[in-house]
Amino acid sequence: MAEMKMVIVARKDIKLSAGKLAAQVAHAAVSCAMKARRYQAERFDEWYEQGQKKVVVKGPDLASLFALKDLAERAGLTTALITDAGHTELPPNTTTCLGIGPAEEREVDKITSHLPLY
């Protein structure tokens, strides 16, 4: 059985408190999980049974999130782009992070392994 994981790419070019970052990453993880459960149930089940591995990495900016999203979707991976409503720290409609997966670790790594850990 292949190792499964989810990667959340958080923008490093915007200022977020630790709590805000945690909330945005959680939104991405939940959104990807729900989407995968519905459309890629086998991948979701494997990932869930393995302990729901998640890794958070730094994305340089908004353009990089869009580029990674495109690559991931072309590879058949689940994605979720998270945009903040702007009620607290950020202006409305600020895109903060991108979730990718769950999928086989090697598939996700083809897209995200060059990014540093958060």
Image: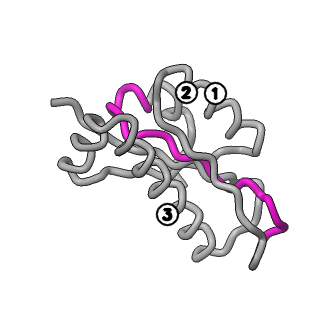
SS at mark 3 in the image: helix
- Which residue in the rendered view is the most extreme toward the left? 1
Question: Is residue 105 in the magenta section?
Answer: yes
The percent coordinates of residue 61 (x first, y second) are 75, 45
Label ID, residue 81: none
> Which residue matches tag 2?
73
Q: Which quadrant of the figure has residue 5?
A: top left
Q: Amino acid at mark 1?
A: Asp
Mark 1 in CB contact with mark 2 (< 8 angstroms): yes
Residue position for label 3: 26
Q: Residues within 10 Å of mark 3 (few under 14, many from 20)?
A: some
Residue sitting at 59 percent across and 24 percent down? 71
Single out the residue that lies furthest toward the front: 38
Amino acid carrying mark 3 in the image: Ala
Image spot of residue 18 (x, y percent): 59, 74
Which residue is drawn at the image coordinates 32% and 31% (left, top)?
A: 104
**Labels 3 and 2: the sequence-earlier one:** 3
